[in-house]
Image (spheres, rainbow, N blue to C red):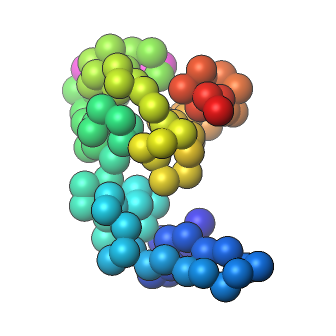
Amino acid sequence: MNEECDITYYNTKSNVKFNKQQVKVPIWFKKDADPKYACYCSEVTEDQVIEAVVKHGAKTVKEVNAITGAMKNSNCKENNPLGVLVLCQYFGHKKSNFSCCTSS
């Protein structure tokens, strides 16, 4: 994951590449992503997660979810560009900690 690179998806076997302009939602880890979604399914942004922690004192993913509404419409496999819950990455959790992250 390189925030500077314009390529969002690629396949080395078929040499198929997609860049940021070819995808319909901003890729959260790209430098100029706007908005930066923490939860693509519920359209919760990184700023909303930060606000939940800083202003409202959230200390866990569960508390962030309750405050922001993240994961209410969870379908990470389809909606998130990585196929996992971005909040897992913010809090350093492994995919197996959340059912949304492990859906197949």
The quarter of the rendered structure image containing the N terminus is bottom right
**What is the tally of numbered marks visible in this picture?**
0
Q: Residue at x 54, y 26 (%)?
A: 100
Residue 91: x and y in percent read: 54, 34
Residue 102: x and y in percent read: 65, 29
* Dominant secondary structure, magenta: loop
Write down the quadrant of residue 15 in the picture: bottom right
Write down the quadrant of residue 99 in the picture: top right
Q: Residue lying farthest bottom?
A: 15
Answer with left or right where residue 36 lies relative to residue 87. Answer: left
Q: Is residue 43 above or below residue 7?
A: above
Nearer to the camera, 4 or 52: 4
Magenta segment: does it hold 57?
yes
Residue 76: x and y in percent read: 49, 37
Q: Residue at x 45, y 60 (%)?
A: 29
Answer with left or right where residue 2 lies relative to residue 67. Answer: right
Residue 49 showing in the rendered view: no
Q: Is residue 12 above or below residue 66?
A: below
Residue 59 showing in the rendered view: yes
Q: Residue lying farthest front?
A: 14
The quarter of the rendered structure image containing the C terminus is top right
Q: Which residues are magenta?
A: 56-60
Residue 20: x and y in percent read: 39, 74
Write down the quadrant of residue 14 in the picture: bottom right
Q: Residue at x 44, y 78 (%)?
A: 19
